[in-house]
Image: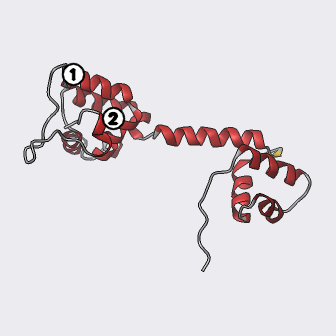
Amino acid sequence: MKTPKEYHRLTSFEREEISRGLAQGESMATIGGCLGRETSTISREVAGNRLNSGYRAFSADNRAIERASWRRRGKNRLAREDDLRTYVHEKLKKRWSPRQIVKRMEEEYRFDMAMRVSHETIYRYIYVDGERIVENYVDQSFTPGTQIPKDPKTGQHRRNGRQNSRHAVH
């Protein structure tokens, strides 16, 4: 049984080799073999990054970097849509939890799906995209000397998952 290979994104060097191979008239299978990549990987790369003048490694690499930074920033609807973000900010300033915000949105915007978002999206926005939102929210919610909330069952400070080093948003 063949074991699956671990996937790694194409490097700048590999994109340059693809560009050179195509310029020399080599097949995608030949280029893939030389790079130790599947033919389909080369084919997708070329198809997704072909310009009017053909495949250019520099342009393909720039687009790959842009896509990667977009993924790292975790852009979600709150990062893109001003009305939605403003609504969520207002509720967070009033110390509403993401679940409370979502429930209210369902009531206020029953037929407007553009103003609907999940509580997971709000948490993701707070903890991944909006560092300064977290800091502003934490500044308003927990003044210096204030205790971090404790779990009523264990009496321990709540420390779970990604909230480990930050104050929890309730």
> Image height check: is 60 above or below 129?
below
Residue 65 place in picture, x, y as percent: 63, 39
In the image shown, does 40 or 13 lie closer to the viewer? 13
Check disc 2: other Cα within 10 Å, few if <14, some if 14-19, many if 20+: many
Q: Relative to residue 27, is residue 64 drawn left or right?
A: left
Residue 118 in view here: no
Q: Residues within 10 Å of mark 1 (few under 14, many from 20)?
A: few
Is 28 above or below relative to 77?
Answer: below
Task: Give the residue pinned by disc 2.
Answer: 126
Query: Which label belongs to residue 41?
Result: none
As helix, strand or loop, the secondary structure at mark 2 comes to helix
- Kindly identify which residue carries mark 1: 140
Q: Is residue 18 left or right of residue 168?
A: right
Q: Are marks 2 and 1 in contact (CB under 8 Å)?
A: no
Kind of residue at badge 1: Gln
Q: Distance of mark 2 from mark 1, alpha carbons?
A: 14 Å
Q: Is residue 156 left or right of residue 126?
A: left
Q: Quadrant of the N terminus?
A: bottom right
User: x, y (%) of residue 72?
Assistant: 50, 40
Give SS at disc 1: helix
* Residue at the spot 63% in from the left edge and 51% down from the top edge: 9
Report the front residue among 83 and 133. Answer: 133
Residue at left offset 73%, top offset 43%: 12
Residue type of the residue flagged with mark 2 = Ile
Residue sitting at 86 percent across and 49 percent down?
Answer: 20
The mark that comes first in sequence, 2 or 1, is 2
Q: Is residue 119 above or below residue 168?
A: below
User: Where is 52 relative to 4, above or below?
Assistant: above
Name the outermost residue toward the bottom.
1
Task: Farthest residue to the right: give it.
Answer: 24
